[in-house]
Image (cartoon, rainbow, N blue to C red):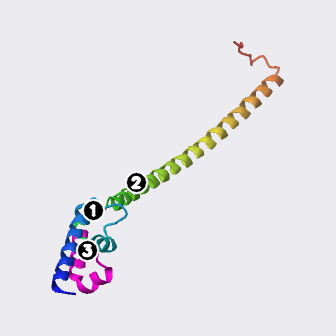
């Protein structure tokens, strides 16, 4: 490769780096080395062999952008946002399941108490019907 072609390829790689890191990323591409090579029109083997310093610089700049919360690739940002949303929803679902279990226990206890009270009332009515004592009087039914 001549010096002039190397310089031209390096300029294209740097321009592609700026474009990918500044965003938005062109359709069909990502903010990665493969897309960098595609956008610059340079084979990946050439990038790794002849321009490892540019690849390292691209990786460094991409990592630095991600550390400060900037995501050059909107799809990756969307994936991260959706992952956080899924985690939040799973946590909410877990809390709701615990709450549902507590309510089911309360319902079972309430039904049990109602059944016991019903049995007691039925037993008292039966006893009332069999007693002929004058000490017990019936209340008027409304």
Location of the N terminus by quadrant is bottom left
* Spatial CA span between label 1 and label 2: 20 Å
At mark 2, the secondary structure is helix
- Discs 1, 2 touching: Cβ within 8 Å: no
Earlier in the chain: of badge 1 and badge 2, it is 1
Disc 3 marks which residue? Answer: 59
Q: Is residue 32 magenta?
A: no
Q: Nearer the viewer, residue 120 or 25?
A: 25
Location of the C terminus by quadrant is top right
Q: How many numbered tags mark residues here?
A: 3
* Spatial CA span between label 2 and label 3: 28 Å
At mark 3, the secondary structure is helix
Disc 1 marks which residue? Answer: 72
Earlier in the chain: of badge 2 and badge 3, it is 3
Q: Is residue 110 left or right of residue 57?
A: right
What percent of the width, then of the height, locates residue 29?
35, 65
Q: Residue at x 75, y 28 (%)?
A: 124
Q: Which mark is residue 85?
A: 2
Which image quadrant is residue 44 in? bottom left
Q: Nearer the viewer, residue 60 or 25?
A: 25
Which image quadrant is residue 30 in? bottom left
Q: Nearer the viewer, residue 138 or 22?
A: 22
Q: Which residues are magenta?
A: 40-62
What percent of the width, then of the height, locates residue 21?
24, 65
Earlier in the chain: of badge 3 and badge 1, it is 3
């Amino acid at each position: 490769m001549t010096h002039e072609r190397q310089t031209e390829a390096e300029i294209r790689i740097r321009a592609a780096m700026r474009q990918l890191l500044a965003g938005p990323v062109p359709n069909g591409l990502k903010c990665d080395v493969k897309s960098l090579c595609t956008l610059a029109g340079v084979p990946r083997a050439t990038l790794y062999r002849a321009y490892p310093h540019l690849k390292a610089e691209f990786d460094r700049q991409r990592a630095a952008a991600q550390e400060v919360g900037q995501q050059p690739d909107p799809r990756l940002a969307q994936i991260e946002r959706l992952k956080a949303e899924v985690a939040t929803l799973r946590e909410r679902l877990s809390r709701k399941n615990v709450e549902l279990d507590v309510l089911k226990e309360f319902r079972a206890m309430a039904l049990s108490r109602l059944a016991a009270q019903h049995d007691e009332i039925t037993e008292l009515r039966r006893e009332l019907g069999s007693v002929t004592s004058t000490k017990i009087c019936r209340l008027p039914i409304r």
